């Protein structure tokens, strides 16, 4: 029986407001997987990417924010599993860890436009399997904060005495793929509990693969709460939501 729990904790993070873009990192395999000498969909031999055996990226396309993700203030990282083939083409692209609001689709579209020189072994090109990490991050506003700011616009750091009261929480469900792979752990989201009883910007502080991050975000958006009170008035606070997945 799977067990999924959510809890909240305090965290201080600067307010993020304006349009951004995605940063891209090419990484070796970081999960327990099949040993070196895998077979791709085309039947070719595929090795695991390492620090010494990896492709050289010649051109990278930045993934664009969707309007919905911008509106929701969503931040996080999409991780794609791909084969950088010896013929210079990207193959067997799979989503290892995605994000909602169209960001996974944006990451895939950007990845498909990458150009690279294949990894080489003893001077010969070889196919390698690794990961592409596309980070969606909204840059901070460059301008200073307004001199006069209404109380309702201020976002406080959540604390033991300044926190919302959760009135309804929805369990984050296991995906079939995560269950089959015995994936467990905790998704941590940094969120704004707004004074108007709505959830504000969501940032994925720590995610899990195979749909669990998306499941946690969906559950977080279904939360209902009474806002934190300061001097008897509702205020917005920023803190963490944790969703623990265990088999």
Image (cartoon, rainbow, N blue to C red):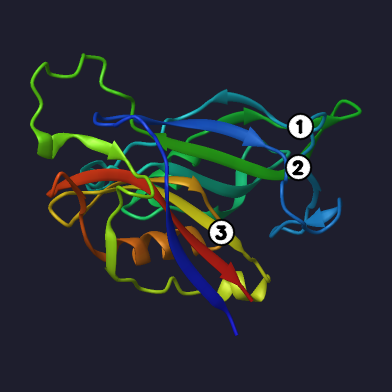
Compared to residue 238, the image places residue 33 above or below, namely: below
Compared to residue 224, the image places residue 102 above or below, namely: above
For marks 3 and 1, the one nearer the N-term is 1
Marks 2/1: CA–CA distance: 7 Å
The residue depicted at 44 percent of the width and 70 percent of the height is: 172
Marks 3/1: CA–CA distance: 34 Å
Q: Quadrant of residue 3?
A: bottom right
The residue at which mark 2 appears reads as 127
For marks 3 and 2, the one nearer the N-term is 2
Nearer the observer, 14 or 226: 226
Could you say whether the residue bearing mark 1 is in a helix, strand or loop? strand
For the C terminus, the image quarter is bottom right
Report if the CB atoms under discs 3 and 1 are less than 8 Å apart. Answer: no
| Residue 46 x, y percent position in the rendering | 79, 49
Nearer the observer, 67 or 194: 194
| Residue 58 x, y percent position in the rendering | 58, 22
Could you say whether the residue bearing mark 2 is in a helix, strand or loop? strand
Could you say whether the residue bearing mark 3 is in a helix, strand or loop? strand
Q: Quadrant of residue 230?
A: top left
The answer to whether residue 136 is visible is yes
The residue carrying pointer 2 sits among few (fewer than 14), some (14 to 19) or many (20 or more) residues within 10 Å by Cα, namely many
For marks 2 and 1, the one nearer the N-term is 1
For the residues carrying marks 3 and 2, which lies nearer the camera in this image? Answer: 3
The residue at which mark 3 appears reads as 186
Marks 3/2: CA–CA distance: 33 Å
The residue at which mark 1 appears reads as 119
Compared to residue 241, the image places residue 27 above or below, namely: above
């Amino acid at each position: 029986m799977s067990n999924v729990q959510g809890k909240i904790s305090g965290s201080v993070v600067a307010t993020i407001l304006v349009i951004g873009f995605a940063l891209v990192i090419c990484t070796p395999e970081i999960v327990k997987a099949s040993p070196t000498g895998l077979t791709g969909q085309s039947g070719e031999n595929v090795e695991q990417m390492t620090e010494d055996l990896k492709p050289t990226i010649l051109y990278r396309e930045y993934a664009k924010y969707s309007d919905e993700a911008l509106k929701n203030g969503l931040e996080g990282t999409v991780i794609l599993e791909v084969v950088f083939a010896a013929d210079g083409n990207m193959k067997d692209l799979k989503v290892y860890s995605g994000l909602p609001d169209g960001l996974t689709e944006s990451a895939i579209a950007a990845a498909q436009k990458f150009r690279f020189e294949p990894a080489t072994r003893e001077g010969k090109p070889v196919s390698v399997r690794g990961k592409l990490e596309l980070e969606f991050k909204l840059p901070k506003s460059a301008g200073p904060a307004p001199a006069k700011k209404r109380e309702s616009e201020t976002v406080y750091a959540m604390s033991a005495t300044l926190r919302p009261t959760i009135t309804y929480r929805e369990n984050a469900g296991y995906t079939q793929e995560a269950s089959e792979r015995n994936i467990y752990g905790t998704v941590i989201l940094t969120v704004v509990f707004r004074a108007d009883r709505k959830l504000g910007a969501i940032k994925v502080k720590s995610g899990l693969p195979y749909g669990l991050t998306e499941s946690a975000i969906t559950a977080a958006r279904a939360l209902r709460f009474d806002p934190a009170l300061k001097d008897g008035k509702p205020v917005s606070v920023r803190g963490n939501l944790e969703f623990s997945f265990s088999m």
